Amino acid sequence: MEQVLRSYEEINEKIRTGKVVVVTAEEVIDLVAEKGVEKVAREVDVVTTGTFGTMCSSGAFLNIGHTKPRMKIHEAYLNGVMAYAGLAAVDLYIGATQPAKDDPLNKVHPGEFKYGGGHVIQDLVAGKDVLLEAYAYGTDCYPRKRLSTWINLKDLNEAYLFNPRNAYQNYNVAVNCSDRTIYTYLGVLLPRLGNAGYSSAGQLSPLLNDPYYKTIGIGTRIFLGGGVGYVAWQGTQHNPGVERTERGIPKGGAGTLAVIGDLKGMSSRWLWGMSLRGYGCSLAVGLGIPIPILSEEILYHCSVRDEEILAPVVDYSHAYPHGTGEILGYVSYAELRSGKIRLGGKEIPTSAQSSYAGAREVALTLKKWIQEGRFTLTQPAVPLPGVESGVRFKNLVERPVTTNAIP
Amino acid sequence: MSISKKVVLRFPSDIADRPLVCELALRFGLRFNILRASISPHREGIMVMDILGEEKEEVEEGLQYLRKAGVELESLSQDIRMVEERCVHCGSCVGVCPTGALFMERPSYLVRYDEGKCIACELCVLACPTHAMEAVI
């Protein structure tokens, strides 16, 4: 049994009395190199992590308040972007990747996707007025059929971000082996291995610093979009059972988080609408998680370096779209962040989709909040499914549909 | 003092087969760096190059030679501008920039833009997810 160095209560007491020792997941690397795991584990109470990158599976629930006469919204648009209205009367969900209804999409390839759900969220958080247009079929208790009004975040009853899948624990590196430029969610990829797109903060990324989910679980309080949020559930496609390195670092996309937080406390600096050419709209999310140093083992995992984190290189012109599973090789985040990787003797420049400077700033901001006593740690109510859970990410098995069986 | 001038050269199809650019070096002692070159289906050529010489007059003489030979000369028709407040420093642009005009400053990991190295290929405009890179005509 691993020796417990401190409890959540003890850490929070230190936060309240201003005695807590906090370092970022980047700073802890040098500390451990200098003093060793054992010593640093005794000195440091919390390690903060961070990431700031495009996270498509994001969105926000909004309750706009009731109109007079009442209306059960059936179809709604925010600045021309469709919001999901298949909920109660005036509850909406605006998804990050929803493009504006008049967007030409990829009809003229590669589409620009200038404005979408992610941009609506950024505008709301920035305090801008947003145009709501809504339609209903009318009922006896909700007779109104049309609505056109400006709304503002401050006037909404509730507005909370609920992102079904964020903070991917590691991810693919995308390259293009074909002879034409391709447009992907990992960026514009030039032909014949012209560049490589990647998207993880590596050594700063939350789940890469807690690879076995020893401290990050359901109920963990986090930095989300510049405000405070919580881990709500394991994210969609959570896949803890992938192959891992000796240090326990997954060698590809593995764990994910579903997160929730009050939009009203967030900032447009950390929720940024994205337009990925030829691919679609999205949202860059700033997310940071504090890791309590409850044991030496937890600290050891926080000291992981980019050199020790490997990502699979995948051809996004063929292997990825066709789901063949073929991996061209593995590269470390140290190589990726150096600006070039080597693959089969060829040097390939790298393009990040995730801002390392942003990740660092998230981790530093969270550190500051904890040092100033503004942010305390929560113990997870339930752990995330781990390696031993048997949880596996499955592909869809399609079943033939006969015409007369369609309801 | 050496000077450098970026120019767009258009070669009409009737002169596209003549060795003209090499004369910049042979006759006028100029150095040049070809930044972009392509030939259209009608065999017209376009070349973007950075010409380096010791004196402004030297460069002008070289360009005059090309003009007389039938090459159409233009300045770079557009500039690429970085709108700093829209940049989130992801680095999407860095890997597609062919000249290193966009680069990741270390150890800050902030994206920086050296306009002098830009050849206005516009790949960054395509790659930037936050509309931070703009072509200004």
Image: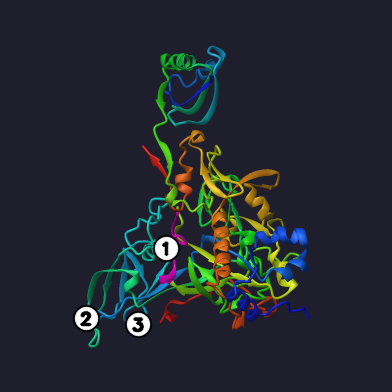
Question: Given this view, does label 2 or label 3 mark the residue nearer the observer?
Answer: 2
- The residue located at (53%, 13%) in the rendering is B28
Q: Where is residue A401 in the image (x, y as percent from the top left)?
A: 48, 76
Subunit of label 1 = A
Q: How crowded is mark 2: few (under 14 residues within 10 Å), some or many (20 or more)?
A: few
Mark 2–mark 3 distance (CA, rounded to whole Å):
16 Å
Q: Which residue type carries mark 2? A: Lys
| Residue A145 lies in quadrant | bottom left
Drawn side of residue A62 relative to residue B128, left or right: left
The quarter in which the C terminus of chain B is drawn is top left
| Residue B125 lies in quadrant | top left
First along the sequence among labels 2 and 3: 2
Whether tag 2 and tag 1 are in contact, CB under 8 A, the answer is no
- The residue located at (60%, 72%) in the rendering is A18
Subunit of label 3 = A
Mark number, residue A118 = 1
Pick the front one: B117 or A105: B117
Q: Among all residues in the image, which is located at the extreme bottom?
A: A140
Q: Where is residue A331 in the image (x, y as percent from the top left)?
A: 68, 54
User: Mark 3 — residue?
Assistant: A88
Q: How crowded is mark 1: few (under 14 residues within 10 Å), some or many (20 or more)?
A: many
